[in-house]
Image (cartoon, helix red, strand yellow):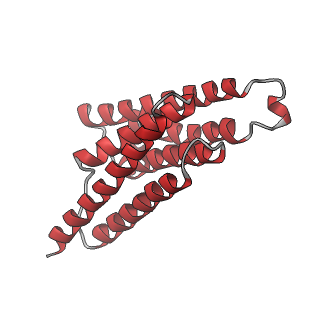
Amino acid sequence: MAMFNVPNTLAFFRILLAPLMLFFLIERDSAMFAGIHPSWLDYFAGLIFVIASVTDFFDGYIARNFNQMTTLGKIIDPLADKMLVLAGFIGLMIIDRASGWAVFLIFTREFFVTGLRVMAASDGIDIAASMLGKIKTIVQMIAIGWLLMNWPFAQAILWVAVAITIYSGYEYTVGYAKNIR
């Protein structure tokens, strides 16, 4: 039953929170939210995002420090991260807070690196997340949080996230190329 350990449960919980956050962002005109100011929907989406982000920290911390790393966890943790980032950026793009170009560049890198990891795995090469890849995720999450709250400099943080995202994709590509020689 190692599959249902605490880190994996937290990752599954994060997977469930991603569409809920997206719901609060894109269903603003729904009759369900009639009479609720859109800023409250931002706060609800932000709260869901913070809870999901905290689970991301704790599932990794618990898995590493309490020897609860599993093959399933190696699959669903990055999937949950990508679903959360996808929900955040798509929702923010729909409500016109995130540039479509920024979202396109971020997702292009994410799909490319995922494909690269699949190719590497088929060659028996394990490409673990690099420190820059972890920083990329953190900066993306900060950008989403700031954009959700519509705080100053949110757009600048988004473009910093884009730059780090693209560079970390380059880093993964170089790492893969070195491993196949």
Quadrant of the rendering where the N terminus is positioned: top left
Give the image location of residue 45, x and y in percent: 60, 31
Q: Nearer the viewer, residue 15 or 45?
A: 45
Give the image location of residue 122, x and y in percent: 31, 72
The quarter of the picture where residue 30 lies is top right
Q: Nearer the viewer, residue 8 or 176?
A: 176
The quarter of the picture where residue 121 lies is bottom left
Q: Residue at x 44, y 45 (%)?
A: 81
Q: Is residue 124 above or below residue 162?
A: below
Q: Is residue 7 above or below residue 115?
A: above
Q: Residue at x 53, y 49 (%)?
A: 86
Residue lying furthest bottom in this view? 181
Q: Residue at x 83, y 24 (%)?
A: 35
Give the image location of residue 37, x and y in percent: 75, 24
Badge count? 0
Give the image location of residue 11, x and y in percent: 45, 40
Mark yes or no: residue 8 visible.
no
Q: Nearer the viewer, residue 153 or 45?
A: 153
Mark yes or no: residue 123 visible.
yes
23 left or right of 4 in image: right
Q: Is residue 126 above or below residue 96?
A: below
Quadrant of the rendering where the C terminus is positioned: bottom left
Q: Is residue 53 above or below residue 131?
A: above
Q: Residue at x 32, y 31 (%)?
A: 62
The quarter of the picture where residue 61 lies is top left
